[in-house]
Image (cartoon, helix red, strand yellow):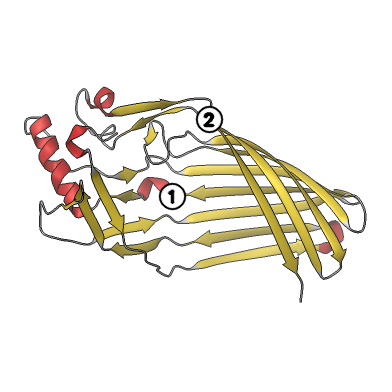
Amino acid sequence: AYTEAFNGYNAKFKEKGELGWLVGGSYQIPEIALKAAVTYRSKIKYDFQVDENIFGEPLQYTAPARTKVETPQSVNIDFQTGLAEKTLAYMSLRWVNWKKFNIRPAQYDALTAMYMDALTEGVYKQGIDLDSYQKDQYSATLGLGQQLTERWSIASDIGWDSGSGSPASTLGPMKGYWSFGLGAQFNPAPNYFIAAGVKYFWLGDTKSEGGGYYLPIEGIKEFSEQAEFKNNRAIAYALKFGYRF
């Protein structure tokens, strides 16, 4: 998908963990089952050792260098309130700063810079990202919950996600989604529960691009379009056991 010049390219990122931080606040009115919360999660910086090769042979086009990656900051807003006895409405909003995210390993950067220099006859001499996103992501979920008995409750929700740009990355080829979910919870005793759910996703149609689509080069858009994704679906399942101390 990244043209014949990079056929056989492989990048192996060493597994690594880093620390971030989060801060939030909440407000409750128990009499009407109202809860509101805002949570901010920080961006997290990584410094990876990346082993790059083509057809199994080490790629050493430039001096070895570590790859810096920064996962995005995000904000979550959660809200719920009682509508009637044993009926609850809830909402979740989320923003993720994806347009600040990119991955560009050192050897891939150098190799694509050489390729773009030759392709554009010196007009563009910089490398391109292995993966990046062009827009921030916004998502929302609206749902209703109903307590049927002292032990059983059910819920359903609809969701929307804006995606993070279209054409999309070849590593995430969809333009957001719509979703519909159903769930149930069983409380055998006051101090523990079992919950299960299923959610169906309608993934947004998009074209995928190989990293150069958004460069300021005449004719690059058609050249960078790699594939078209339509009518895709996904299903997610969840099972949760909880115990209250």
- The label shown at residue 22 is none
Are the residues flagged by discs 1 and 2 in contact, CB closer than 8 Å? Answer: no
Q: Amino acid at mark 2?
A: Asn
Residue 193 image point, x, y percent: 79, 63
Would residue 197 be seen by someone viewing this image from the given angle?
Answer: yes
The crowding category of the residue bearing disc 2, from other C-alpha atoms within 10 Å (few below 14, some 14 to 19, many at least 20), is few
Q: Mark 1, mark 2: which one is toward the viewer?
A: 2
Q: Is 125 on the left or on the right of 166, as rendered?
A: left
Residue 12 image point, x, y percent: 29, 56
Using the image as rendered, state which of residue 176 and residue 15 is in the foreground: 15
Would residue 126 be seen by someone viewing this image from the given angle?
Answer: no
- Up/down of 120 relative to 73, above or below: above
Q: CA distance from mark 1 to mark 2?
A: 25 Å
Q: Amino acid at mark 1?
A: Asn
The crowding category of the residue bearing disc 1, from other C-alpha atoms within 10 Å (few below 14, some 14 to 19, many at least 20), is some
Q: Secondary structure at mark 1?
A: loop
Which residue ends up furthest to the front in the rendered image?
56
Residue 58 image point, x, y percent: 16, 54
Q: Earlier in the sequence, mark 1 or mark 2?
A: 1
Residue 2 image point, x, y percent: 26, 35
Using the image as rendered, state which of residue 230 and residue 120 is in the foreground: 230
Q: Quadrant of the N terminus?
A: top left
Q: Residue at x 69, y 44 (%)?
A: 198
Q: Quadrant of the C terminus?
A: bottom right
Q: Residue at x 89, y 52 (%)?
A: 86
- Label 1, on which residue? 97
Q: Residue at x 41, y 31 (%)?
A: 166
Q: Secondary structure at mark 2?
A: loop
Q: Is 3 on the left or on the right of 142, as rendered?
A: left
Using the image as rendered, state which of residue 176 and residue 95 is in the foreground: 176
- Label 2, on which residue? 232
